[in-house]
Image (cartoon, rainbow, N blue to C red):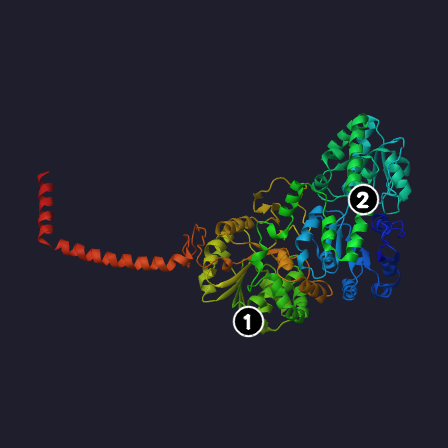
Amino acid sequence: MKILFFNPESYVDFEEEPVNYALRLPILNCGVVTEYKDYLYQRILRQEGREIANQRAISEALEFKPDLVVYSTTWPHESLDIFVFQEILKHQIPVLTQIWDSPMHGLVPYQLELFASCTYFGISDSISNYFRFKSISARMPHLKGIFFEAGHHVFTDLFQKKERRKKYDVTLIGSNEGRRVQLLDYLKQELKSHDISLYKVGGLVDSTKGDPAEGLTDQFISWNSYVEIINFSKICLSSQTQSNRNQIKGKVLEYLACGTFCLSDSNPDLRRLIPDDCIVYYDSFEDCLNKIVYYVQHDDEREKIANAGYQWFHQTYNYRKFWSEFLLSIRQGDTETINRIGQPPLSQKSLNFYQQHCSFSTLSFDDSESCKGDRVTPAAALWNQRFSVLEAGDQLRSLFEAVGHSTMLMLNQWFQWYALALDLKPDLILELGRNWGNSTCVFTEAANQLGNCRVVSLCPSTSWAEITQPHLAQIVSELWFRVLDPKVTDIPAADVETIIGDSQCVLLLWNVSGSDNTEFVLGRILPLLRNRRHVVIVPNISDTRYTGVSVSYGEQGLWRNQDGRSNQLILDHLSFTDEKVISILEFAARNRFMFHSADHSFLTDITGNQMIDLINLSVDRLFWQNSHWFWFSLNEIDIYESIYFPTVDSLKPGSNAKSAEIVAPEMTMLEQRLQQAEARIVELESHIAAMQSSKFWKLRTLWLRLKRTIR
């Protein structure tokens, strides 16, 4: 079988790079490869530039005509461009793309591009991301297999158990980076009093960051030396550079393959992969210290765990068997076997957990099935309006630069909201919260393009009139502002009934905080939108499945809202600081509708081919960056279902809204009953009047007067 390797060369010569030992050599030594060729794309990119590196890659594939291209990825800025693989796939040459450092939380656009442009996709460091990618794999046009192969990357021809005297008490192999530096400083100080030696060696960067005499260096060591050091160590310590990183480090499995005791920082993926009796975890620096001291002093227990880890690894992983089965299955077109052998070796309990919590279609606040149909969604809107967005790109960029507050609303969010406005075609865009006017510009530009749309912006801030509008006047005409009504007002005091008027389709931006504003939206605005076509945008919420937002507490304690300030709150896959989101989720749960993630929309509402086209449409990938906003619409609720709105404590002057629950489908029936009751009252009043004029009534009245007189 012919294999063409696209090899990186990030730090050292490619034959010394970790990926050579983790991917290239295991494939070459599995017994199936008959011919191979290496293309060092990162070396060519650095020496001759990106264009030549891309064209050479395509030429190598078309001339060599391999049975498989194996692409080992590196940093995005030094990777081959996506079109290279799309061109190779057009010539019916399959591509295996291997990623090494998947994002800490969720998926990122760069890796989604790779995922959408390969035949087979390998993940080596995250079981969570394996299941996330797998849940969307059916949408990828070229994809035939996805696999998690962490243990099969261990080249056991090199990583072997050797009978060596354990001369190092505890060894940490890796670069001096991040939290690992803090751990080393702590252990170096504390272990002295226990007469325990700490040996620190290795790292990809060939530079000395510490005193080699003290065993603190990042100087690159050979692979043979690396294996010797593992075998010379009583304890091999694994430490992440970031405390909240849920990643399976390859070196952990290399330690087990050599039969050395491994002490690792705890993370969920590693715990679900490796049995508890095969490895020991620590939860804090102090816990790490205590366990080092204990296991250095208890040889028998340490060796028992090390031997259990050794046995488990070699019973579970065999690189020759895995890669030979994989390559032969490619030749035979057996995708079932590829996907079967690519599954992580998990217990049924762990498998159930990942399928429940890491599959995008099953998370509780979203439902991919509800994103189908003809209604407007962020991804469908961007696809439908992609050429209109491109045409407006220069104008939107000019407005973006004129506002000058890019952190308030990113340029890709401008594009997404502009597309949503064009696709929804509202006759009213109601903006709650304007500040400097990023969203105001987006929607005013969209309203000008739509022609039959007005923008009403409510905000107590005067920044728009005093600062932003004068800047805009230099690049747009006075006519541009004619569709905009920027009101400076306390938002709950606005006469929203008059503002909405007889509008039939409304796009609402909810960009204000505070309980009064939340009550205003849920209790006064939404009842008015119930029977009109509408979409509500809620910004500043991150979807942790895609955006890489940390779910760690870090230095913060429990979530609390104090003096209008709150720290980060995580609910399912939502990350936010604004307490109004809690009210929205409660309102959505009460009325049984979905609060949708825009990022999720881009992976579920369009096909894989459409996704690829959007990725390639913009040179700066602005069509495909994280969104950080959510949306909802009461139009998703069946017209015969009741909708319950909260009571508004104090209706503002000029409001005609009712603050009680509004039960929309029963209104006609209630009106009919009211008319019947009014008719009945008239009838009863007539009967009473007749009774009062009768002789009997007059006698009764005289008798009561007489009775009171006698008393």
Of all residues, the one furthest to the front in this rendering is: 332
| Residue 583 shows in the view | yes
As rendered, which of 15 and 376 lies closer to the eye? 15
Label ID, residue 482: 1
Residue type at numbered disc 2: Asn
Q: How many marks?
A: 2
Q: For the residue labelled by badge 2, is the local secondary structure a helix, a strand or a loop?
A: loop
| Horizontal relation, residue 317 to residue 36: left or right | left
Image quarter where the N terminus lies is: bottom right
Q: For the residue labelled by badge 1, is the local secondary structure a helix, a strand or a loop?
A: helix
| Horizontal relation, residue 413 to residue 205: left or right | left
Image quarter where the C terminus lies is: top left
How packed is label 2: few (under 14 Cα within 10 Å), some, or many (20 or more)?
Answer: some
Q: Quadrant of residue 171?
A: top right
As rendered, which of 539 and 222 lies closer to the eye? 222
Instruction: Mark 1 or mark 2: name the one nearer the start of the chain.
Output: 2
How packed is label 1: few (under 14 Cα within 10 Å), some, or many (20 or more)?
Answer: few
As rendered, which of 244 and 209 lies closer to the eye? 244
Q: Which residue is mark 2?
A: 318
